[in-house]
Image (cartoon, rainbow, N blue to C red):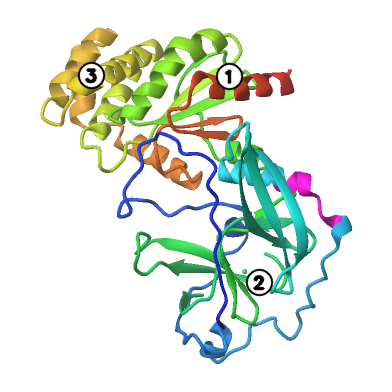
Amino acid sequence: MKYWLCAALIVLSVQACEPGSAEKAPAKGGAAAEAAAPKAVKVEASKDGPGIWGHLGIAPAHAEDAAEPAPLDLSKIDTTKMIRTIRAELDVPEGVDVRIDDIRPSLLPGLAQARMILSKGNMSEDQMIFFSNDGRYVSAYSMYEFDEVVTSPVAGFYTLKLKAIGGQDEGESKEFQVSEDGKLLTMGDFWDTSIDPNAARMAKISLDKTASRGKQGSKVVLVEFSDFQCPYCSRAATTIAERIYPEYKDRVEFHFKHLPLSFHDWAKPAANAALCVKEQGEDKFWKAYSYLFENQRSISRANIDQKVRDMAQVAGANAKEFAMCYQENRHAAEIERDMAEANSLGITGTPAFVINGRKLSGAQPYSAFKQILDEELANNQ
């Protein structure tokens, strides 16, 4: 096969701390990923060969019994649901208009294709997207011919978990959806348009032990994933502290979760220190939060131990209790759980915010927070 279909989505450059290619965690989650866990098989395949199944010397287990994929039925295609799902999964910024046009059958029998147009003002970008013929599953990722694969919820397809070779993604796990004949594949998950992606995302977040403030029990919840060493996190924290929290504290519930990035050498000790202070009171945690971000530029790996002692004093924590907690790294497991949770949500950079399931990435301006919060408050009266 000689097909090479490639598309890229570029909607906004955001300011955020991101890991380098060697440090990025593989994205997880999605309806397709959770619905099946296929056994992995590694195959050497030539470019002119018959595809993965031919190289394996086998036919898919259900190939003889499988029904032919239903043809494209335009009456079943709900582009509103597709756009809702795409916005949530790709973090399309508010203010960017999304349209789907030119729907037609694709090279793959079980998939249709269309053009997705993103526009804002006089600027626009477009790319090809793929979706199941009934419109339920949609993917905005690239499609490639494969040479080497590792070895399923749309009829006529299998889910493959591949490991990238070479390039900036070398060593990373990737998911592909491969056609039953094994000759073409599309990168990424199929997203299930029958579910609300924002509700599904929010359901993955545990709020049991997080530092929180604002209106407890509110129907609007803002969760902040942050790193005390990240300069963009400091900028976002200032926006939250000076404008967002004062304006919305009586209407919105605020939570903080830890995502110390691997290339920040004092971020984990700072996270542990903040949680040690939290043991002595929620109000003390938020004082520690302010101290760490406000003094970020003066903190280093060499002086972090002294700086967190100063932080504990400013926060009003008992010095002896704090020291014992900090020295034994008591909250290491909690921090790791927050990091794993962020990874399950596809969050690899900081800061990142989840507002009722809607993701907002980077050091966004006041207006970006305000727009989402006002919409969620209006929708949840």
Residue 340: percent from the left, percent from the top? 42, 44
Q: Name the residue at the left extreme.
A: 302
Residue 221 in picture, x, y percent from top left: 58, 24
* 10 Å crowding of disc 3: few (<14), some (14-19), many (20+): many
Q: Which residues are magenta?
A: 76-82
Give the SS element for disc 2.
strand
Q: Quadrant of the N terminus?
A: bottom right
State how far apart marks 2 and 3 are (Cα).
Answer: 55 Å
Task: Reply above or below: 302 against 168.
Answer: above
User: Which residue corresponds to the image point at 34% horizontal and 68% vertical from the top-left?
Assistant: 166
Image location of residue 310, percent across then percent down = 18, 14
Q: CA distance from mark 1 to mark 3?
A: 36 Å
- Residue 322's tag is 3
On residue 246, the disc is none
Tell me the residue that label 1 is attached to.
370
Q: Secondary structure at mark 3?
A: helix
What's the mark number on residue 157? 2
Hey, what amino acid is under mark 2? Answer: Phe
Which quadrant is home to the C terminus? top right
Please report whichever mark, 2 or 3, sits nearer to the chain's N-terminal start.
2
Residue 247's image quarter?
A: top right
Whether residue 30 is visible: yes
Q: Is residue 373 left or right of residue 287?
A: right
Q: Is residue 25 above or below residue 96?
A: below
Q: Earlier in the sequence, mark 2 or mark 1?
A: 2
Number of other residues with Cα within 10 Å of mark 1, as a class: few under 14, some 14 to 19, many 20 or more: some
Describe the element under mark 1 as helix, strand or loop.
helix
Callout 3 amino acid: Phe
Q: State the residue at coordinates (55%, 42%).
A: 11
Between marks 2 and 1, how big is the CA–CA gap? 42 Å
Is label 2 or label 1 in front?
1
